[in-house]
Image (cartoon, rainbow, N blue to C red):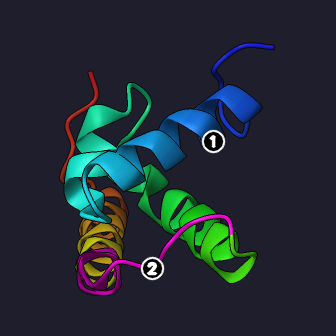
Amino acid sequence: MSRGTGSSEEQSDLCAAYVRHEGEMAVVLAELKCGQLVDAERHCSTVESLIVAGQLRRYKRFTRSAKQLRRQANYALHVYTFMLTFHVFNFQ
């Protein structure tokens, strides 16, 4: 299986980076090869599920950084949507 979206290898990489960086999700996301701001919600949700399942420890940094990362991703999506709506991009 490849290290693509949702693969077990991607989850293993995510868990290892989460533990290594003690829940600092911006750093975790930067370390992941496929980690982009648009993936923030998916990665944060995966970590949250593993915490609830008892497979990962909840770090205080995770709670703070995940909230901040989700806010940034949401803002970026709104800006991108606004720019598309008003044809700010010049695709020629």
Q: Position of residue 82 (x, y in %)?
A: 29, 70
Would you place residue 5 above or below residue 17 in this image? above
The label number, if any, that marks residue 58 in the structure image: 2
Label 1: how many Cα within 10 Å (few below 14, some 14–19, many 20+): some
Would you place residue 5 above or below residue 25 in this image? above
On the picture, is 81 further left or further right than 42?
left
The label number, if any, that marks residue 38 in the structure image: none
- The magenta span reads 55-66
Give the amino acid type for the residue marked by disc 1 in the picture: Gln
Quickly name the residue at label 1: 11
Residue 2 image-quadrant placement: top right
Residue that appears at 28% across and 29% down: 91
Residue at the limit of the structure toward the top, as seen here:
2
Residue 80 image-quadrant placement: bottom left
Residue 71 in sight in this render: yes
Q: Position of residue 69 (x, y in %)?
A: 28, 71
Give the amino acid type for the residue marked by disc 2 in the picture: Arg
On the picture, is 76 further left or further right than 10?
left
Q: Position of residue 71 (x, y in %)?
A: 28, 81
Q: Nearer the viewer, residue 76 or 29?
A: 29
Residue 72 image-quadrant placement: bottom left
Q: Quadrant of the C terminus?
A: top left
Residue 35 counted in the magenta span: no
Mark whose residue sits in front, 1 or 2: 2
Alpha-carbon span between mark 1 and mark 2:
16 Å
Q: Position of residue 79 (x, y in %)?
A: 24, 69
Residue 83 in sight in this render: no
Residue that appears at 28% across and 34% down: 31
Q: Earlier in the sequence, mark 1 or mark 2?
A: 1
Residue that appears at 69% across and 75% down: 54
Would you place residue 48 above or below residue 43 in this image? below
Label 2: how many Cα within 10 Å (few below 14, some 14–19, many 20+): some
